[in-house]
Image (cartoon, helix red, strand yellow):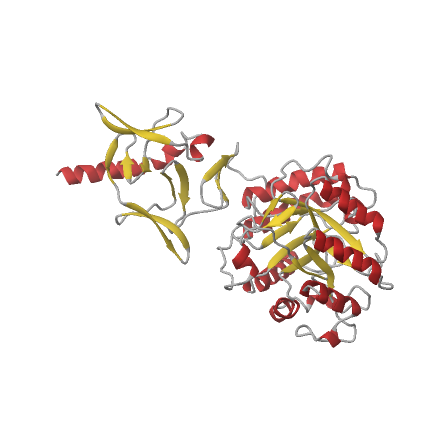
Amino acid sequence: MECGVKKRILLMALCILIPAFFLLDGNDASAASGEWISDAKGWHYRYADGSFAKSEYIDGYWLNWKGNYEKKWNGTWKKSAKGWWFRAGSWYPLEQWLKIDGKSYYFDSEGYLVTNRWIGKYYVDGQGVWTKTRSSSAPLVKPKTTQLKKPSYPQGSPAALWGALQVKGTQLCSAKGEAVQLKGVSTFGIIWDEGRYNINQDAFATLKNDWGANLIRIAVYTEEYGGYCNGSDQVSTETLNKTIADAVSYATNLGMYVIIDWHILRDGNPNQHISEAKQFFADMSYQYANYDNVLYEICNEPNGGVTWNEIKKYADTIIPIIRENDGDAVILTGTPTWSQDVDQVAANPVSDKTNVMYVLHFYASTHKDWIRNKLKTAIAAGTPVFITEFSICAADGNGSIDYQSAAEWKQLIRNDNLSYAGWSLSNKNETSALIKNSSSKHSGWTEGDLSETGVWLRNLIRGN
């Protein structure tokens, strides 16, 4: 009889876990320390702020909704291929909150711990712990996509070794805080013939295995032909989304990192298509919230006189949308004058600075000491810089190669351990194309298939 009563009490306690959660505040979510105390009613757990644990599991003991110790409860964390879950005997939480040792967690309909997501008004971080609350259960922008499960990466691959990247000072670092360098290539426009056929698994494998690349940048143009915001070209959003998804999948299968690049160019001011950008990044960040290898470049090359204040206003709108879905991904924001004026950032950086880097682009034949000095100034001021696009020819992507200027840029990249993506993975008849115009191969390139620029970049990535 006594056993049956206790079982009913435990079930009642579990039933009130959700309403009990709403009594918590942000400090409770961060697991304040406390102590066990006893009185005439029994044992209780008191936090450092004087509050008492209720409807909670602490140190192996269940405290009921009044805060009274009720029973020893052999709850343990378990892990399977799908993720972490929590079991107490034959019971485990489903579609509910559970507070364990001072931290609040949410478990999905299969009983697995949810991470890096908003659950209504409440956000759980990469460890699944509730860390912040917003004023409304509705997101800033409702995603129109399905969230993908956390992928597995090949053993020994960059993504497997480094995990979710972070920014510390001016340096890009691994999940463990160790300095890393992303180095790779940018696709051409993802719908354009000169480059789209090179977006395939074998091509990315060639870049990884032969070149030593660990990064692919996916150039999603906004205004130009086939652009995401150009509805007059008969290129559907579905087609573009599938191409992006395929590219992310290819890179992920190889354990490479990938930048999803909102490729502002002809539109100049990123605020021109801010409504489309808000939905795009709501969708992308929700879809890939569980992917440690995805970075977001929110505007490629602001130009046409747009100021840093205008770009910052845009960034301060887009970054919170990404953060609602993907709380710790690295975000890259362009800078004025085709992403050259990176030195302007330090005086007025974006509002949410966590894991944010600023974009610099250069073309070695055009951009010499006056741009290199901007880079040096930015880094000296503490601005984290990522070179998401560059080549060794002129700024129009053509003309002659300046090997001397290229060598000076190479030295700067090495001195400051800068991450970079070279332009571009195409066989277009221009100097910046990495593949010869005469080559029809879409993977497995030998040195004879590469342009002069392609040979130079391959050597750079290889460390030569």
Is residue 292 at least partly visible in the picture? yes
In the rendered image, residue 174, in percent from the top left (x then y), is placed at 56, 51
Q: Residue at x 71, y 55 (%)?
A: 414
Q: Residue at x 45, y 44 (%)?
A: 128
In the rendered image, residue 39, in percent from the top left (x then y), is placed at 24, 23
Q: Quadrant of residue 461?
A: bottom right
Position of 7 with respect to 193 (left or right) is: left
In the rendered image, residue 189, in percent from the top left (x then y), is placed at 72, 60
Position of 320 with respect to 265 (left or right) is: left
Residue nearest the observer in this picture, 238 or 157: 157
Position of 258 with respect to 107 (left or right) is: right
Residue nearest the observer in this picture, 228 or 382: 382
Q: Quadrant of residue 252?
A: bottom right
Q: Residue at x 66, y 68 (%)?
A: 211
In the rendered image, residue 447, in percent from the top left (x then y), is placed at 73, 74
Quadrant where the image shows the C terminus: bottom right
217 over 459 or under it: above or below: above
Quadrant where the image shows the N terminus: top left
Q: Quadrant of residue 259?
A: bottom right
Position of 272 with respect to 330 (left or right) is: right
